Image: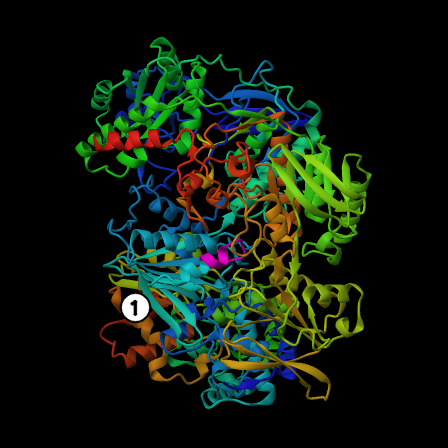
Amino acid sequence: METVAPFKEVIDEIKAAGGEIFRLCYQCGKCDSVCPWNRVRTFSMRKIIREATFGLTEIDGEDIWRCTTCGNCVQHCPRGVNQIEIGVSLHRVASEYEVFPASVRSARTARASIISEGNPLQGERKKRAEWAEGLPVKQFAEGMEILYFVGCYFSYDPRMKKVAVATANILNKAGIDFGILGSLENCCGESIRKTGSEELFKRLARENIKTFIENGVKKILVSSPHCYHTFKNEYPEFMVDFEVIHITQYLSELINDGRLEITKAYEKKVTYHDPCYLGRHNDIYEEPRNVLKKIPGLELTEMADSRRDALCCGGGGGRIWMDTPMEERFSDIRLVQANEVGAQVLATSCPYCITNFEESRLNLEYDEVLEIKDITEIIQEVI
Amino acid sequence: MENERVEGSFFNSPADRNFGDVMVVGGGVSGIQASLDLATAGFKVYLVEKAPSIGGHMAQLDKTFPTNDCSM
Amino acid sequence: MTYTEVDSVEGEAGDFKVTLTKKPRYIIEEKCTGCTTCVEYCPVQYPDQFNQDISQNKAVHIYFAQAIPLVAYIDESCLYLKEKKCLICESVCQADAIDLNQTAEKVEINVGAVILSLGIEPFDPRVREEYRYGEFENVVTSMDYERLLCATGPYEGEILRASDKKHPHKIAWIQCVGSRQVIPGGNSYCSAVCCTYAQKQVILTKDHDADAECTIFHNDIRSYGKDFERYFQRTEELPGMRFIRSYTSIARENPETKNVAVRYSTPDDGVKEEEFDMVVLSVGLNPPADYEKLAEIFGIELESHGFCKINSSNPMETTRPGIFVSGTFQGPTDIPESVFTASAAGAQCGELLDYRRGNLTKERIYPPERDVSQEEPRIGVFVCHCGANIGRIVDVPSAVEYALTLPNVVYAQEQLFSCATNSAQEITDMTKEKGLNRVVVAACSPRTLEPLFRDTVREAGINQYYYDMANIREHNSWVHSKEKEDATQKAKDIIRMSVARASLLEPLQEYDLPVNKAALVVGGGIAGMTCALSIVSQGHEVYLVEKDADLGGTARRIHYTLDGMDVQAHLHDLIEKVYQHPLVHVYTDAKITDAAGYVGNFVTKVESERGITEIEHGAAVIAIGADVYEPTEYLYGEDDRVLTHLELEDHIVREEEKVVKAESLVMIQCVGCRNEERNYCSRICCGVSIKNALKLKEINPDMDIYILFRDMRTYGFSEDYYREAADKGVRFIRYEPEDEPQVEPGESEEGRPVLKVTATDYILGQKLEIDADIIALAAAVIPSAGTKEVAGLFKVTLSPDEFFKEAHAKLKPVEFAADGVYLCGMAQYPKQIPETISQAYGAAGRVLTLLSHDTVVASGSICEVDEKKCMGCGACLSACTYGAIEFREVKKDKKAVVNPVLCKGDGLCNVKCPTGAISLKHFTDEEILSQIDAAAA
């Protein structure tokens, strides 16, 4: 067995990067027992934390980049260790040294794209509103009821653009006075922050906040749980407080208030997948289900591992930009779970989840078996 | 529960109906022990228990460690 | 007063006015015989609370089989109470005990003091969904499991799964459910009892099913109590038993088998998922339900977790004078603590109310005893149904009929519950009426009820030894529940044997021994002084004997506790009180040279600076404390940078530079114990190391502190300090006994002379090498050097670990098997200062139960020597564990003599005597042979 000495300098760096909470760990293994990684390969969060405790972190290794920030260990940790904070601090240290394993390099591309174009998808900034061409979608102006903050994936990704369109259609149908920021919109910064790019996150946040203020934004509607999370829980670090609402919450509200009327049936068996950043991170479990339950003909079924125990799609924490070997994708397991309960449609409400699920759908050759839908896409069909 | 014999009874009260020395609240093992000690040491005790029987949680246990003696 | 709640407590110490509400039982307690006829007829099925809702009971029922009082009550599920229907119970009750019009009754009482023994509430795992309790059928709590194990439980002692009523074969226990967690719904503290109760459940499970596969998932096994370490090993060595160090998650339920899949993580194998037939949640202890309301009613303050706020220098004290607390309401504790804190709270009531002791109680007066020695035996036989316990199996009427045919039996009858007050009265009455001179009750074990029936016979004016008990329950109906006819025959056999013996019984006299009102306390540490002061505060003289020149004991070397108590200030205060109290006589530099006598009448010789004194006393308390192991490990004694934790504390208090300015300090736990030589845990060391680490971090926050441990045993609220230490940056490294840390002198990278400590870290799978400036060893607490000598003098025994052995591990934690000798403090086992203080008060409370009487009664069933047959071989002397037999010179011969007061009547000597000279009264050869003959007849 190898003998090593605690590496004080590394410990201090991790502490300085905000990861000091490792100190609370009493090595009970609970985090490992709930971590989705252990369904596909061996991975020990406990060990990551232990290494950080003694400054023995393999800063250039793959393991520190694995955590998808799904938050399952955080919600179970009996000692109150925030594993996500530790992971992020390790990413900051690695970014400082600019050491990245091969699988992480594509995340660097995303970062570069955010820096230059304000999105991780290498889309041109000026084309951010291209998805809305031909639709009655206005530029946001002061006095409007709500700002629809579209988000990067919905603006550029061909699959996700459909969701943005569905959302706009629904809002118009309900007669909402809304607008978008178009090229003024910037990446929210949630995921890039998780990869350790703290300064970039701060820049994005400041720019977005500035735009919101300059445009007189009061209430923000988002399609992505990641935008929701950072606006709601992280932007207040900059001493601002905008009202943020996720589309599933908004839909639930509109339907309940009678502003949006469901007129058609949807005769399919649907299961709902809780995105980590909607469920575990923000406690939104009921609204999406309430929306689906309002649809006549729709049979809602629950998969194994739902709500608090929902299995992560694998896309959080910047993992959406990294390479995950085929046999290590949580989203494959999730699709099998959906199929096991006989669902025809796997509904969710997160761009990362949908992206990963669509890919798994191809891999598993599930194109005849299962449809992947954003909740808005279902609603669009029934109003 | 091995009950000790107590000289002078603590359930029936003598002359002063509602006067006692000590009220013990809770008829689990601790409350019973305190009552027995005090009664044996010459005090009149009221043992007040909210359940229909004394015994507390210990009465629900099958055996006790590390001797594996019966709890009752 | 059962089924009663406290509404308010007004007034002050010495004069409290209490308002109580007696809830309606809808049963007239005085009339109910506990026959359970009403229960049989009641049509309402309702989950049985006592059996954790696993089985059903009726709306009218007795709380549990051995309930006290053994009377029924009607709960809210009653049809009449709900819809004014039914009333079947009223019509079937022959005692007219049902009264459905009862209402809650307010009662006011006046008392001088109050003791709160409010207990705990088991943690309800429903508050955290992750445990799946209530969702997966085969996930049960440990409390449910206790009921499953129990013969009086829902399936009469069969462990069955809820899903299919089959025996589970593969069972997992999940530890720390609701404990040691800072997540919503959980408790941050350690519940202190779960590790060992889970082991108990494993052992009992293996008794039920020797092939059962049991797994305990844990994160530290906390076997910190007396004999717990051996118990842990006993469990560990069971075949098919695994201890796995991992918390778990309950993953899913197998839809077909309803087995429960558990996921856990080990450093070697990573995360595994395994299916179990049943999962037991080792639930922790919560404060009593409604604790906030209770605090308001009693006018007391609570600590942050909802338990009673106590003073660590007197843990029985609440924030309201005159109201004391005992048991688990002080914080999560085990049964022995609950018992001695009860005695301790009693002692404090005694201190407060000594002036009125005896005013409200009165002695029982028995009728004069009739001399029946010249009469022929006239035996009465009373056969008990014990509700359904006996009656459902044994044909009681036929047993009664049979009894009447036996020689000397002149009367026989059946009784529903012989132990019920009215039945006992019936025995007394019939004895008088029929002129009986011997009584046999065929019922349960003499262990529980013989004293009651002896008393009953005595009430009838008959010598109480003219009584015999035939056990037809434990020895018969409980074990032969499926063979009713054979059981009835066996009952008859047992009765016949008992009757044969009863014919030969002789009247025996019990002795009233005078009680000397003074106590001797051996040991002048915190335990001895606390105990002495409580005794003298209740009006009795105390002789306090200390071997050193100064009082204080080990506490002289302790300065602070985890919870911030100033030990030296407390100690000075105690010493001052001891010297100032006129009733305490202190002997320092003292040595006990002889101790003779027996309960109530001891004579002890003490050599001290006062010369030789002969002290007469009625009770003795052994409080001689403990010593610290002097390590031979880890360069202790060779390198002055290696200290014991006591030395470390001393250095910290004196702010010695080499310690408080150290860059790096390593503590090593379990030095000199939890090994072959000392197979026990010293209990206090984990807490002590955390205490010192926190103190050092306070003085020098930059110091690197490492604690190398085997299991962190910060039980109870100490767990909070464990987390605090981690939060302050103290690092914890676990080691295994077969891979102990290595220490050798060396140099740091910067060239600083250091001690190199190497230890394996199991999570990293690497060896860590740490540079230490100071090493502090958690040296074991070992029995005081004087233990064996003192044990010999007072004829008391020692446990395997050579601490003093109490009379009963759970229920008599401050007494010895020898009457009149008591025990407290570290002499019994290592313990923290607040625990020592509680136990010392507890011993005082027990001493008072003796000293407050003028006499004590010694049993009549004792041994006797026939001098003619005795040849003075001494075999009996060595057989007696109580030192009750001595030699006496008779005409140049040595003859054995039994001291009737010390004899416990165990009969060990009888067997050893080669000439049959020694016999045990009430169990004479003749009596026993007559029973055997009757059995064979």
Residue B32 location (% of width, % of height): 52, 33
Q: Which residues are magenta?
A: C223-231
Q: Residue C429, relative to residue C288: is it above or below?
A: above
> Outermost residue toward the left?
C485
Q: Quadrant of residue C12?
A: top right
Mark 1 Cα shell of 10 Å, populated few (<14), some (14-19), many (≥20) = some
Residue A49 picture quarter: bottom right
Give the percent coordinates (x, y) of residue A281. 49, 65
Q: Is residue C227 magenta?
A: yes
Q: Position of residue C724 (x, y in %)?
A: 63, 62
Badge 1 marks a residue whose secondary structure is helix
Up-down relation of residue C450 to residue C884 (above or below): above
Residue matched to label 1: A337
Q: Residue at x 72, y 88 (%)?
A: C750
Horizontal side of residue C728 vs C661, given as left or right: left
* Residue C504 higher or lower than C121, as above or below: above
Query: Left or right of C429: which side holds C700?
Result: right
Where is residue C420 drawn, in percent x and y?
Answer: 39, 22
Q: Amino acid at mark 1?
A: Gln
